[in-house]
Amino acid sequence: MKKKLSLLLALLLLYPCLSAPAEEDEDLLIEEIVENVDLDAVTYGEVEWTFPIPLEDMNPEYIRLANKHYLLADDYVPQDLVKVPSKPKNGGIYWAVQPKGGQLLREECAQALCDMNAAIREAAEENGYRSLYLKSAYRSYQTQRTMYRNRLERNNGKDDGWVSMPGASDHQTGLGCDVVPSNWRDKAMNDKMMKEPECQWMAEHCHEFGFIIRYPADKQELTEINTEPWHLRYVGIPVAAYIMENGLCLEEFTYELQDAIQDFLSRGGNPETVQPYIQEPAD
Ligand SMILES: [Zn+2]
């Protein structure tokens, strides 16, 4: 309230400089000016939060970055993993019975993926899209370590950017999943998949369900991962919309958010408010 009053006072003082032709109604003009100023800027305590997304619209766990600089611990296991329902007719998504116990994802992410599959199935009636197929979901640190070792062995000990090192995999978050059109379920994955209408549909609509394309084609330098049109990452709807609309990757989003946090702290913001959102690289 105090802020509102002082802003109004400032505007009144400024009024002579802002004034329009004399015939206009003065009171109306001031009202219009006040209306156009954002009086509801988000503040925590007395300190303004300048980042476009309020903290309460971001779940710190859902925006957690996992890459070779921001490593997950070997005992990091997400708390609310659930088996993804596999029957599309009952609101699920097809997957193979590969991992013991089925394909797992964090609960909210699993639901979002099923909702997205239901949406493309609905669109399929008009556009002939194929169903989506969940090729890979949660992977433990230990599974990732085995996959990484196998890949290095097959590739003369060289990391070719196709399999992440243990702790660096987005799959360990329980929020990363490989989703392909059903005709690709048994094919080797490569970036030709990007031409498939289902992948284009996903790129266009995934944010509506809280997903981003985790490894976009034009961000390889930042993600250090080859482009993967099939790898979706759940971050929640407000963050996904921001990332996809601004053409970012999760690394860029993280740097922007960390800058905003530093700025907030430098203006006297309460460290406890932002603490859960602070992420630092291991190296
Ligand atoms: Zn993946």
Image (cartoon, rainbow, N blue to C red):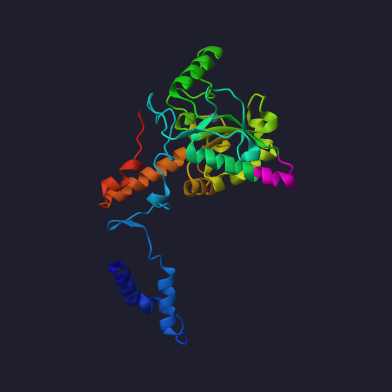
Location of residue 182 by image quarter? top right
- Ligand 1 quadrant? top right
Magenta span of residues: 120-129
Q: Is residue 4 visible?
A: yes
Q: Is residue 212 visible?
A: no
Residue 123 in the image, given as x and y percentages of width and height: 69, 46
Residue 60 in the image, given as x and y percentages of width and height: 39, 42
Is residue 122 highlighted in magenta? yes
Is residue 143 highlighted in magenta? no
Q: Outermost residue, front direction?
A: 90
Instruction: Identify which residue, 236 or 253, lies in the foreground.
Output: 236
172 relative position to 39: left or right = right
Quadrant of the frame with the C terminus: top left
Relative to 89, is 75 above or below? above
55 relative position to 163: left or right = left
102 relative position to 40: left or right = right
Residue 136 in the image, given as x and y percentages of width and height: 56, 28
Residue at the image point whose x is 38% and y is 66% from the top: 39
